[in-house]
Amino acid sequence: MAGPSDLDKQIGAVRDSMESSIVVLRDRGKRELKRVERMALIAAGVGAAVGVIVVGLVVVNRLRRPPTRRERIERLIPLGWWDRLRAGYAKQVPPMRLYVGDRQVGEETRPPMWESTAARLAKTAGTAAGAAIVTRGATLVLEWLRDRGGTKQ
């Protein structure tokens, strides 16, 4: 039977060994956090650069191509007049309803409740599966990079 002093010594030894492991784990966590922050900054920078390039291409394309006939007319006729011209034309055409078979076009029947619920469930399941696949892929890439780098656990 071990006495209280033996138990205190054993507890102290376990604490010392755990404390070094905790310090190592904290350091790993800090390094990983810094690495993830760098990756997020790089991703944000790349996204911003792509956005600037896309906007630049749209502006250059808009400036380089000649204006269409419609754009030229819109420049000549003020918007208020353009709206009045359209409104005047719309008043000349009487309202009509188009029927195909026995159904009015544009008025669709609502799908049954089970059908919309099944569609929502399928969408949710697909989103969850996609997220799981992407997460697993990212984990595999990170493990491969870690193994390739030769870092020791």
Image (cartoon, rainbow, N blue to C red):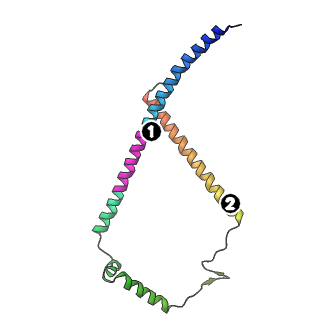
Q: Amino acid at mark 1?
A: Val
Residue 115 is at least partly visible in this image: yes
Q: Tell me how far mark 2 sits from mark 1, CA to CA.
A: 38 Å
Between 99 and 24, the one lying in front of the other is: 24
Q: Is residue 62 part of the magenta span, yes or no? A: no
| Residue drawn at (51%, 90%) of the image | 93
> What secondary structure predominates along the stretch shown in magenta?
helix
Label number found at residue 20 = none
Between 19 and 29, the one lying in front of the other is: 19
Q: Secondary structure at mark 2?
A: helix
Give the percent coordinates (x, y) of residue 76.
Answer: 30, 82
| Residue drawn at (38%, 48%) of the image | 46
Task: Pick the quarter of the image with the N terminus.
Answer: top right
Q: Identify the residue under disc 2.
A: 117
Asked where in the image residue 120 lies, by quadrant, the reply is: bottom right
Judge left or right: residue 63 versus residue 100.
left
Q: Is residue 53 above or below residue 135?
A: below
Q: Is residue 50 part of the magenta span, yes or no? A: yes
Q: Secondary structure at mark 1?
A: helix
Judge left or right: residue 78 versus residue 130.
left
> Reading the chain from its start, which is encountered first: label 2 or label 1?
1
- Foreground mark, 2 or 1, reads 1
Magenta-tinted stretch: 35-52
Judge left or right: residue 16 versus residue 33.
right
Q: Amino acid at mark 2?
A: Thr
Label number found at residue 36 = 1
Q: Is residue 153 above or below residue 81?
A: above
Give the percent coordinates (x, y) of residue 101.
Answer: 66, 82
Asked where in the image residue 2 lies, by quadrant, the reply is: top right
